Image (tube, rainbow, N blue to C red):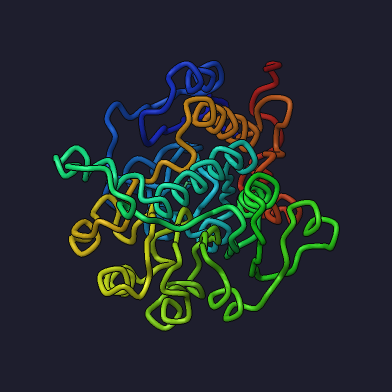
C-alpha cells in the first residue's frame, strides 16, 4: 500500500462541515460550484484519486474510470444509482455505495405531497388565483379527486413504496394495491395495508398511481401510451423515481386530451431540461427533483456517504466494510481494490 494519505474528490458542493470530516484522513479536492461534469472532466478528476463522493449529476462508467488506477471507492449521495455503471465498477474492483434508509420518510412525504397537490389541483388553483381569475366564488371551481377512501397504486414496493403505502392506508383510509418484482411477505403487506396485484390489474384499478421503482433498462418507459391507456381517465400519476420510467410525450398527450386527469413529476428524462409539452399543461405539478430535499435528510445523506467513503478506503471503525456497498460481493470474493491494497489505511478512531 502506498504510504500516503488517500486522495478524495467531492464532485458537487455538499455540506462543508460534514465533508470536512474527510480532511482528517484524506487530501480532499472539493468542487465549489454545482457542475454538470462532462465525461472527460469526470475521467480527469477520477484519474488520480482513491475515492470520490458523487451525486446523480455524475454519470460514471467504464470510460470515466479507465485511467483511474488508484480509485477504490465511489460513494453516491443518493439512494438511486443509475448514474453509476455498477457492472463496469465491479469489473474494475471499485466499490460503490448509496444512501438508503435516511431518505425514506422524507421522499415518501414528497410523493404524498405531490399526490395531494395534483389530485386537489393545488398548484393550478394558486396560479389561477394569482393570475386574477377569481371573480366570484363558485361551487364548481377547481373540482379535483379525493384521496381518502380512494384506491392508491404503488409501482415498486421498496422502502419508499412501503412508506407511501403506510401514509395512504393508515392516514387516508385508502385501499392500497401494489406491483413489484417480488411480493412482500404477508406480515409486511399487512403492516402497510397493501395487496399485491399484477401490473395490468394495478393500472386498471387505481385512482392514483405513484411510481417508486428503480430505473433499469427493463423498466425504461414502462409507463408508456399503452400503460396510460389502461388507467382510469380520472386518475393521478406521480413519478418520484426516475424520469426514464415514464414516456413523457405519451403522458403529456394523455393529460392534454383528458385521458388522464392529473400528474405530478419530480424527475425527468433529461434533467434539468423539462419538455415544453409538459410545461404547457396546467394539470401537472412539476418539481425539480427534490424528493429527499429536507435540510435534515440531505445532511444525513452526506454523513452516510462520508461514512461509506471512509470505510471503503479502509479508514475508521467500519474500515473495509462500507455499510451501504452496492457491489458488496467484491468484498467477499476478494476482488475489491481496497482488499487488494491491504487492510486499514488509517486507524484513527472517528
Ligand atoms: C434521489 O433521487 C436519490 O436517488 O436519492
Residue 88 is left or right of residue 290, and the answer is right
| Residue 25: x %, y % from top left | 56, 20
Q: Quadrant of residue 11?
A: top left
Q: Foreground: 14 or 283?
A: 283
Q: Where's the N terminus, which quadrant?
A: top right
Residue at point 55%, 37% (across, down): 106
Residue 245 is left or right of residue 177, and the answer is left
Q: Can you name the residue that lies furthest to the left here?
A: 132
Residue at point 25%, 70% (across, down): 256
Q: How many marks?
A: 0
Question: Measured along the vertical axis of the image, is residue 180 above or below residue 267?
Answer: below
| Residue 52: x %, y % from top left | 47, 38
Question: Measured along the vertical axis of the image, is residue 274 above or below residue 51?
Answer: below
Q: Can you name the residue that lies furthest to the bottom here?
A: 226
Residue at point 66%, 61% (across, down): 176
| Residue 26: x %, y % from top left | 51, 23
Q: Where's the C terminus, which quadrant?
A: top right
Res. 11 in view: yes
Q: Foreground: 98 or 113?
A: 113
Residue 110 is left or right of residue 307, and the answer is left
Q: Quadrant of residue 273?
A: bottom left
Q: Foreground: 116 or 72?
A: 116
| Residue 210: x %, y % from top left | 52, 59
Question: Measured along the vertical axis of the image, is residue 276 above or below residue 320?
Answer: below
Res. 327 in view: no
Residue at point 65%, 41% (across, down): 101
Amino acid at each position: 500500500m502506498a504510504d500516503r494519505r488517500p486522495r478524495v474528490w467531492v464532485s458537487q458542493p455538499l455540506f462543508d462541515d460534514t465533508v470536512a470530516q474527510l480532511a482528517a484522513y484524506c487530501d480532499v479536492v472539493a468542487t465549489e460550484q454545482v457542475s454538470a461534469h462532462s465525461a472527460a472532466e469526470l475521467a480527469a478528476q477520477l484519474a488520480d484519486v482513491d475515492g470520490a463522493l458523487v451525486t446523480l449529476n455524475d454519470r460514471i462508467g467504464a470510460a470515466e474510470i479507465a485511467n483511474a488506477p488508484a480509485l477504490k471507492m465511489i460513494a453516491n449521495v443518493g439512494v438511486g444509482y443509475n448514474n453509476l455503471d455498477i457492472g463496469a465498477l465491479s469489473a474494475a474492483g471499485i466499490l460503490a455505495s448509496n444512501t438508503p434508509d435516511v431518505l425514506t420518510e422524507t421522499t415518501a412525504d414528497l410523493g404524498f405531497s405531490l399526490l395531494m397537490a395534483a389530485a386537489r389541483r393545488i398548484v393550478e388553483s394558486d396560479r389561477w388565483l394569482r393570475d386574477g381569475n377569481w371573480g366570484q366564488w363558485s361551487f364548481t371551481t377547481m373540482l379535483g379527486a379525493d384521496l381518502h377512501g380512494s384506491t392508491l397504486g404503488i409501482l415498486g414496493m421498496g422502502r419508499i413504496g412501503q412508506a407511501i403505502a403506510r401514509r395512504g392506508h393508515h392516514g387516508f383510509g385508502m385501499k392500497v394495491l401494489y406491483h413489484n418484482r417480488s411480493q412482500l411477505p404477508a406480515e409486511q403487506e399487512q403492516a402497510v395495508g397493501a395487496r399485491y396485484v399484477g401490473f395490468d390489474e394495478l393500472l386498471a384499478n387505481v385512482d392514483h398511481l405513484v411510481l417508486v421503482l428503480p430505473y433499469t433498462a427493463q423498466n425504461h418507459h414502462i409507463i408508456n401510451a399503452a400503460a396510460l391507456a389502461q388507467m382510469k381517465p380520472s386518475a393521478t400519476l406521480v413519478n418520484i423515481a426516475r424520469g426514464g420510467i415514464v414516456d413523457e410525450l405519451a403522458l403529456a398527450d394523455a393529460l392534454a386530451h383528458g385521458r388522464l386527469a392529473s400528474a405530478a413529476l419530480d424527475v425527468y428524462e433529461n434533467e434539468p431540461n423539462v419538455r415544453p409539452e409538459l410545461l404547457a399543461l396546467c394539470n401537472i405539478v412539476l418539481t425539480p427533483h427534490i424528493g429527499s430535499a429536507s435540510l435534515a435528510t440531505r445532511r444525513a445523506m452526506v454523513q452516510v456517504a462520508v461514512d461509506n467513503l471512509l470505510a471503503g478506503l479502509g479508514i475508521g471503525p467500519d474500515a473495509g466494510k462500507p455499510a451501504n456497498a452496492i457491489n458488496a460481493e467484491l468484498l467477499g470474493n476478494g476482488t475489491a481494490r481496497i482488499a487488494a491494497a491491504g487492510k486499514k489505511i488509517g486507524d484513527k478512531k472517528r
